[in-house]
Amino acid sequence: MFYYAHSLPQEAQEKWQPLDRHLQEVGRRAGEFASAFGAYDWAYLAGLWHDLGKYSSEFQAYLHNVNGTEAHIESVPGRVDHSTAGAQHAVVQMRLLGHLLAYAIAGHHSGMLDGRSDRVCQEDRLKKSIFDWKTAPGEITNTDHPTLPSFLAKALSRKDGFSISFFIRMIFSCLADADFLDTEQFMDPDKAALRVPLPSDTLVRMEQALEEYVGRFSENGTPVNADRRKVREACLIASNRPPGFFSLTVPTGGGKTLSSLAFSLRHAIVHRLDRIVYVLPFTTIIEQNADEFRKVIQLVGDIPRERLVIEHHSNFDPEKETAFSRLACENWDAPLVVTTSVQFYESLFGNRTSVCRKLHNLSRAVIILDEAQTIPVDYLQPVLRVLNELTTNYGATVVLCTATQPAVHKRSDFPIGIKGVREIVSDPKELYRRLKRVNVKNLGSQSDDDLVARLKKENQVLCIVNTRRHARKLMESLGKENGNFHLSALMCPAHRAQALNMIRKTLADGRSCRVISTQLIEAGVDVDFPAVYRSMAGLDSIAQAAGRCNRNGRMPEMGRTYIFRSEHVDKERFLADTANCAAQVLDLHGASLLELETIEHYFKLYYWDQTDRWDAKNVLRSFNLTHEKNLPFLFDFASVARVFKIISENNRPVIIPWEKEGRELCTMLRILPGLNRDVARLAQRYAVQIPLKTWIGQLNISIEPVFEGSMGILISSQLHYSNAFGLHFDDPTGDTLFV
């Protein structure tokens, strides 16, 4: 009997994919991916055994019956389980160590499971009765046991469950990507043909393009540009150091974006690393940084820019997306990837194939964690631990790049910290002194009336507050005269982008410009005001706010940043921890609030002194070794994926029919039978996320559900969406239900 892995619709059997060829090719691809961290043989075996269940006569009969591509998907009822066989075989063939492969093989379609659970779990899969597949050839099933990578042997000897679990996760990633790519090669060769390898000197060409780009501005001899050049020179010098942990501590406006790119390119070239991954906390920063990178990369010979720089985040503009970038987002196979911290961290702790497929491409990569201080304290220990795994065992370099460097170095009172972090800038304190462009003053408590009176006296001013409700109230008091602007996440992304363009033009023209905003404007948005007011928040947020003040050092005098306590503190409990820490250091340090000693004191309070919150979700305690022969590794991959959520999923999108394109989109959403990728991407440009409770309360009143309630369309934008404030729902008493 001849065995097949996949069939082709309406094609004769001789054109179907032989099963042995699929297994060997997936093994080869997976092994090559894992060779980056010295585990070729392990990933090769995972690939060789992943579809052993397809040797059953039942699967072959099914394949012949349907003669369709969907036979590869197990989650659809009626499909024949073909992954459990390989997991069980790994355990029989390799005993204890076979379990390392069994998790990856059993989960290569539906995701890795918990070891033991009242849901579907790994223990059940290993005990499951399956169809006979023993006709598989011996050259596939009987292979030599692979040698343990040295780091894995050490992890096993010290019973380091997390390190072992991360090795499984990386093997799983190699297997998932290899399986997808080989299946794609057979099922969709035209799509596969787009994945042409780039020239071996691509990073060298990108560095040359950066040098040419920066050279255009070298004649600009302002003091700020002179300091930016010094930062870049320090980055180039540090790039020759061995891979590992680095920190780049540069104040806002110090040129850290292009300087960190210079470090990354040179470091990758010198040490033969494969790619650069920029991790940023917010999509507004990503869009801005990616656009700046494209300005640089457009000078790279005949290589299309979309193959060099990819953005992977939820609000990506479909007009920027290409066939190349769409494919590269699947597995991050590109020289320069720009993504969000949510996408990055949740992938590192995920369990689904679509989420984890890209992880192996983090080995031998330069990972830039921009605004590194945004690591949530509740996930701090697992995040630091996984970063340490990447640098210690997988050949990656991690750069903590921020204007307010969090104190994450290991020390006696912070045992979970990172050892051996090397600072790129030789004297950060002196750099901060030279680049100081703002004086900070504490105004104490300010009523809304007092605050508005102050703002009206300013010609150009930015005021940042902590809640959407507060921003709206201030804007209503300020008035809707020309030059007054409001920004919040209740405005859809397309609307916010338009408003920011108007703000920048108004500032550039020197006209009156007063902006009331929530903290979204602190996310790397390139605006420059002579005066900034900031409601009390974490010190990192205050520093980001100050970074919108005299940003480019063009003012003859210092910019002015004012901190105040609003009259709505009781509505800002979600910021209590960070605001209280900032208030404590403010009382002690006063005017020197943005100096490095003050920043270190703040992070000591916020990070070091909150021991009970370092791993609030018990992530690290979810990977345990046992003395049980049948389940020696009790790893809860599925449970960890469910609890590791940087952003709560308790929101639902409302699509806004804003302007012509938004209205046309909503019309399209009402008639489409299903939501395809292109339409979903476009919808993100017009989506506002609101709490599920509010969404349900407005359902079929102000919100029309589409696609089985996965999203809604705002029924009347005239009633519930304004160019001034964005989305709002008002009750008859005039109180705003959601702002």
Image: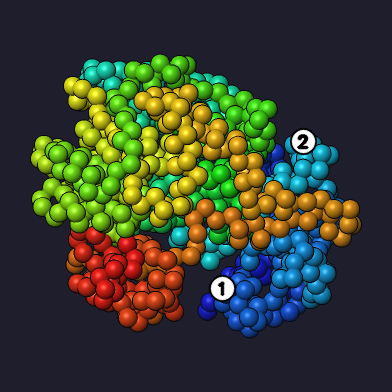
Residue type (three-letter) at the residue carrying disc 2: Ser
Residues at marks 1 and 2, CA–CA distance in whole angstroms: 40 Å
Given residues 712 and 698, the one toward you in this image is 698
Left or right? Give the position of 75 relative to 220.
Answer: right
Given residues 539 and 230, the one toward you in this image is 539
Q: Look at discs 1 and 2 and give the one toward the viewer.
A: 2
**Residue 416 placed where, x, y %?**
66, 36
For residue 69, the mark is 1
Image quarter of residue 435 = top left
> Which residue shows up at 65% across the image and 57% down it?
640
Q: Pointer 1 and pointer 2: residues touching (CB < 8 Å)?
A: no
Q: In the rendered view of the protein, which quadrant contains the N terminus?
A: bottom right
**Which badge, 1 or 2, comes first in the chain's sequence?**
1
Image quarter of residue 22 = bottom right
Residue 683 visible? The answer is no
**Residue 589 placed where, x, y %?**
43, 25
**Residue 318 placed where, x, y %?**
33, 58
Residue type (three-letter) at the residue carrying disc 1: Thr
For residue 150, the mark is 2
Element type at mark 1: helix
> Which residue shows up at 32% across the image and 23% down it?
436
Element type at mark 2: helix
Residue 508 visible? The answer is yes
